[in-house]
Image (cartoon, rainbow, N blue to C red):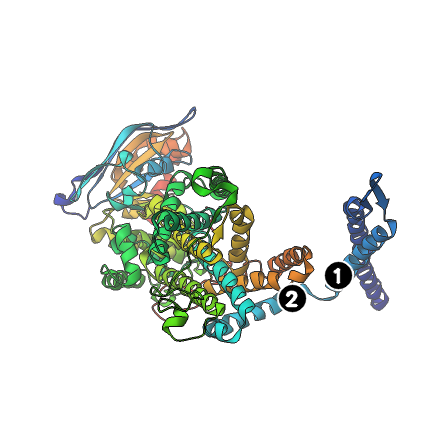
Amino acid sequence: MTQAPATSAPLLQVTDLTMRFGGLTAVNALSFQARQGEITSVIGPNGAGKTTVFNCITGFYKPTSGSIALTHGAGAFQLQTLPGHGIARRARVARTFQNIRLFAGMTVLENLLVAQHNILMPNVGSGLLSVFGLGGHHRAEVQAIDLARTWLARIGLTARADDPAGALPYGDQRRLEIARAMCTGPVLLCLDEPAAGLNPRESDDLAALLKSIQADGCSILLIEHDMGVVMRISDHIVVLDHGKRISDGDPAHVRGDPAVIAAYLGEGDDDDADAPLATAAAE
Amino acid sequence: MSTPMAANVAAVARSSPAAAAFKDAALSALVALGLFGAMLGVLTEATPAGVVLVPRPLLLAYSVAAVFAGRLAWLLFRSRTPTTKAYAGNRTVAEALQRSGRFVAPALLAFAVALPFMAGRYGIDLGILVLTYIMLGWGLNIVVGLAGLLDLGYVAFYAVGAYSYALLAQTFGLGFWTCLPLAGILAALWGVLLGFPVLRLRGDYLAIVTLAFGEIIRVVLLNTVSITGGPNGISGIPRPTLFGLKFSADGGPGTFSGFFGLEFSPTHRVAFLYYVILGLALLTNWVTLRLRRVALGRAWEALREDEVACRSLGINVTVTKLTAFAMGAGFGGLAGAFFATRAAFISPESFTFFESAIVLAIVVLGGLGSQLGVALAALVMIGGLELFRDLQDYRLLIFGSAMVLTMILRPRGLVSGRTPSVALGKRQEISAELVAEGRG
């Protein structure tokens, strides 16, 4: 909404994505778009297939059929054909996890440096050279630490840089995981329920952080249950139910869509059904 | 009115652990009876008339009584001392170790450098043995401690290194110093070759497959008689030279004693071998410490912490695992080449699973990922095994009990905890509870 029209080129194009686990069809012929510079949210009731879509996009599942195309300055990629690590490395899609997956026994700073692995060590040869202090590793590391410092300041964890990540409070771990993903230099950041388990103040901080990441030019794909956060920051919302897209549009459109209300509250009286989403949006 | 009641309650509370301890001890005695019944209760004796069974009821009764009394005493002792105190004591020990760690490493190094001047032939030989295991431990520490891949077949690379040197030296007449890097490279190559198919496995499965590979290498060495000599092994492996100077008794200008005008002594060669393995071990240590500080080593540790997260950050998990495997194998190969040149004779018998188990035990007892811990564990285990040599087979019993004890008192090894590879401020130790052990 706040973005200039020039930035609204399609970044991610999901076409006819289907994912079956044995007899269960988790995602059924799903198509949607995420545009450059926007925050796109994927919402839906529990079991709607949101995380499955997410895992397909980030290479953790190979979809049964369909295509996931990503187009940006560095080229065009068919994400379903890339190897697992290629998604982050070549297509520059970073992700976080629903259950936080930090390197608990490593310090906060080390977590941010591991994320810059491919910059520090473009290939095995340079990795081996770095043992002898060759191959420009030292210079790269100084730059990597600078970037890490910047992110530490942005998430307010500078004072805890040398503490093990596993010892941080929950909210800090959430933000650190986002900072770690951002240290890979992504064009698309995929967040799997980043507001889960946060208190209202932390949710506000998170929304501000995501907005500032968007302002830096990184597009965001978000799965979230906290409707307050979703309605406030999303430019575009895709609603899933039973693996299918049931609604697609800006927050105002989705909020008023009868199909969405029916999916969340069951088929029922329209007057009652409107309430929770409307309240959430009013926050 | 409340006083007698409280006393009563206290009495019940006191009597019930005693009763429980008694019951527990009786149960232990029963288990002991079952176990010892066959092992101690009867003795097989070969007489001219054939093998006869001699019952030994008294010995059996003593053993079972000892188990009962020991278990009872232990349980009663434990119920008296609050457990929190034991933990606190444990932590103090850990902190003291951590603090003294800074001085222990240089002291050990100084001792290692000075040893040949202080000890006799036996001492130096023992030093060589301990250092070989320290080097193997440090090599395996890269795979198990840093990358978190459980490798039960590490001895395979030790064997590849030893046979590479022996065969290269015998077939092409190459010297030790030419063959040493070749042996390391060949072992690393084998590491990659073996690693490629198995590294998609995780945890227990990886352990089983590496165990099998270790055995396969040994069986292949045993059966390709035309190349490796099979069970007869390879003998007459050339000794290393010091810049072309031989260590032999003929005293010519081409020998160490002749060149320096010293009187020939066989200790010279042993001391030289000692410094060679000391140098190799320190090289392993230096490379490992350097690697921990750069991206590659950090990726290994990240892999141990969380493989899925690594993948999401664009780290090529397969390549990273393979480099760890190859690096560990390479150092194993160097140690193997040294073993071949020291013993001058190798046969598949030197490369059994027992060796892998000892090296892994050294790494686990020392503390996964800790260089100092591995060195201490090798010193204690290999040195200890030698000290108790007079006890013959019972030394393995002592060895086993010592391991069980260490695992009870310090479950994460002698030196647990992890030093961060980089810090903005002061580096502070990360407690072992947070550090993952890796699941392969």
Residue marked by disc 2? B86
Mark toward the viewer: 1 or 2: 1
Query: What residue sits 38% from the left and 65% below the top?
Result: A162
Q: Residues within 10 Å of mark 1 (few under 14, many from 20)?
A: few
| Residue A100 placement (x, y as % from top left) | 41, 50
The chain to which mark 1 is attached is B
| Residue A79 placement (x, y as % from top left) | 26, 36
Number of numbered labels in the structure image: 2
Residue furthest top as drawn = A23
| Residue A35 placement (x, y as % from top left) | 20, 40
Mark with earlier residue (1, 2): 1
| Residue B70 placement (x, y as % from top left) | 78, 59
Residue type beneath disc 1: Trp
In the image, taking residue B166 as reference, residue A78 lies left or right, namely left
The chain to which mark 2 is attached is B
Residue marked by disc 1? B74
Look at the picture and state if A238 lies above or below A230.
above
Quadrant that contains the N terminus of chain A: top left
Query: What residue sits 63% from the left and 58% below the top?
Result: B399
In the image, taking residue A52 as reference, residue B220 lies left or right, namely right
In the image, taking residue A35 as reference, residue B293 lies left or right, namely right
Between the residue at mark 1 and the residue at mark 2, the CA separation in whole angstroms equals 14 Å
Residue closest to the eye, A271 or A278: A278
Q: Which mark is residue B113?
A: none
Residue closest to the eye, B67 or A278: B67
Instruction: Give the structural element (helix, strand or loop) at label 1.
Output: helix
Residue type beneath disc 2: Ala
Instruction: Give the structural element (helix, strand or loop) at label 2.
Output: helix
In the image, taking residue B78 as reference, residue B328 lies left or right, namely left
Query: What residue sits 28% from the left and 34% below the top?
Result: A80
Look at the picture and state if B336 lies above or below B103.
above
Residue closest to the eye, A53 or A109: A109
